[in-house]
Amino acid sequence: MRGKAVTGCTITQKILAAHAVGGTAEAGQIVTIRPDVVLLNDVSGPLAFEQFDAMGATAPFDPERIVLVADHFAPAPDVTAAGAIAMTRGFAARHGIRHFYEPGRGGIEHTLLAELGMVGHGGIVFGADSHTCTAGAFNALGIGFGSTDLAAALAMGQLWMRVPESIRVELSGVPGAYVTGKDVILELIRRIGSDGAADAALEFGGPGLAALPVDARMAIANMAVEAGADTCVFEGDALSAADMAARGMAPVAAVAADAGATYRAGIAIDLGALQPMVARPPSPASGVPVTALRGQRVDQVYVGNCSNGTMTDLRQVAEILRGRQVAPGVRMIVVPATQKIWRQALAEGLLEVFAAAGAAVSTPTCGACFGGHMGILAAGETAIATTNRNYRGRMGHPESQVFLANAWVAAAAAVAGEIVPPDEIATRFALEAA
Amino acid sequence: MSTPFQGRIHRFGDEVNTDVILPGRYLSLRRPEELGRHCMEGLDPDFVNRVRPGDILAVGRNFGCGSSREHAVIALKAAGITAIVAVSAARIFFRNAVNLGLPVITCPDAAAALREGEEARIDLDTNSVAQGGRTWEGAALGDEVRAILAAGGLVQRVRQALANAA
């Protein structure tokens, strides 16, 4: 059932109203939302499955609209993790859920969900993962929850929430060389702080949108939660429509805000004025231009995760690494976000470029991003990563540190062994003869 | 109706994220007793040695931000924490806490005033905090949150709803 048309609505309110029991969604209202897709992983899933059973639920609301992904501790590093994945696999089998994915056929849940063609214009995803907001890139709402909330969503097919106000982010201009979606979101979080969008939805639009491909929008949407946002959403356009078509989705009109929509605040970002940004530990909100950190030594370079493990990111890395070497004493780990991306990178010869440069290429996994496995940092070590969090101890020992940056900057640091503006790589590190 | 209870305060600052409350390397664990042993390990490895059952946290802005991991709430409860008095709490953490029956009282004045080691008294019926003759009232809870807390958590609330629907 589609919701009643109310004038003066934001994109967020319109999408929520269209999924609300009762059909309305005004800022501050408590509503019951029926999501299109419910998403869980091997860390949030097992807790949710136990709660689902404890609730006395016997069958999930709709097996076709549930997606379970083994991505965090996958491939399983130990027996405990293997048990959690087995439990997830078992829940899928017991309830006839065919959307269960694990290494070899899957990837990182948020990137994978888009790839599967399960999120597009006007949709709603409820995910037991804070980065479910990545779906905002597709003119959809991705909303993160904990396991017990999603156990209730599995059981009932619906969940209560408070309708947020929206903050409009008006994008203009065209980004310069080496400036990406990552830099847009690091700049935004720097400006408004880690709770600057608390109790609000971030809505991105404006003429600058045309210069941001869908991968860049995913990098931006992914970190909306790092500004404290309840969720986020991009305006739909020709690029998002083409992306849906490429993923085999039927065309659906994008949801636009009303001309008279009310916003809590407006923020303008001129893409042309941005520089590549680096967020210093221990907060994603502590971004500075890359030039301010020139010379910062790194022990590990990590490219991957649900914000920046796309083909766009891998091509940027390859452009820097092709004909060059990872600096002595530095280790580099490249993690394509999904199996499909991994295979595309293989087909384009990118994996060979990474391997020839001395980088390790991993199967898709959340891996070391959350300090799980596959590249944990020791005490005193420093990493630069294309991931989304650099909290104390995020990637390992509490006395390790993480700088967040885009894939150009990460790759440049791999070659130089220290943070360096990527436009200096060509002059400082000549190409080796093939 | 719930009985007011008293507990000893532990203070933490702003932006205490769920990664430091329960580091990612422990996320394949699920049992409360296992998670409780690592509570706050990312920020204060000695916390588990000092905390006692019934203790209360007084914390700063944006408590529980970051990862949606419910393991953080399970760890705090298993370590003995019975309530959190916060300047503010992140949305997902707040919901997780309510769902598992761990009350979070949003009250900047109380969170700022309470000192390490003080005994504070929590009254959930009035959503208030008292210490040494001072009383503060927390931000009002919505009907849905109060209903979940009254049921004893979201599992019980959904259990009732499913039973009523059957």
Image (tube, grey):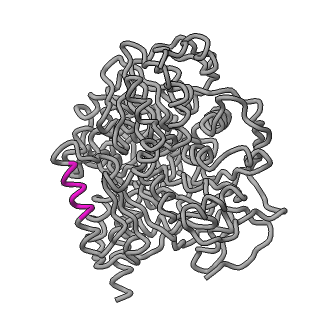
Q: Is residue A172 part of the magenta span, yes or no?
A: no
Assign the N terminus of chain A to one quadrant of the image: bottom right
Q: At 72% from the left edge and 30% from the top edge, which residue is drawn?
A: A176
Q: At 76% from the left edge and 30% from the top edge, which residue is drawn?
A: A273
Span colored in magenta: A81-89
Give the answer, above or below, for where A242 lies relative to B107. below
Q: At 40% from the left edge and 64% from the top edge, which residue is drawn?
A: A67
Q: Is residue A168 visible?
A: yes
Name, please, the residue furthest toward the left. Answer: A79
Based on the displayed image, in which of its 4 quarters is residue A353 positioned? top left
Name, please, the residue furthest toward the bottom. Answer: B166
Q: At 32% from the left edge and 59% from the top edge, which residue is drawn?
A: A45
Task: Give the total number of marks visible in the rendering.
Answer: 0
Q: Is residue B134 visible?
A: no
The residue lying toward the viewer, choosing from A157 and A377, is A377
Give x and y (percent) for residue A243: 61, 58
Q: Is residue A88 part of the magenta span, yes or no?
A: yes
Q: Main secondary structure of the magenta part?
A: helix
Based on the displayed image, in which of its 4 quarters is residue B20 positioned? top left
The residue lying toward the viewer, choosing from A158 and A84, is A84
Give the answer, above or below, for where A85 lies relative to A14. above
Give x and y (percent) for residue B155: 33, 68
The residue lying toward the viewer, choosing from B54 and A70, is A70
Give the answer, above or below, for where A395 lies relative to A196. above
* Horizontal arrangement in the rendering, residue A16 relative to residue A113 (left or right): right
Based on the displayed image, in which of its 4 quarters is residue A285 positioned? top right
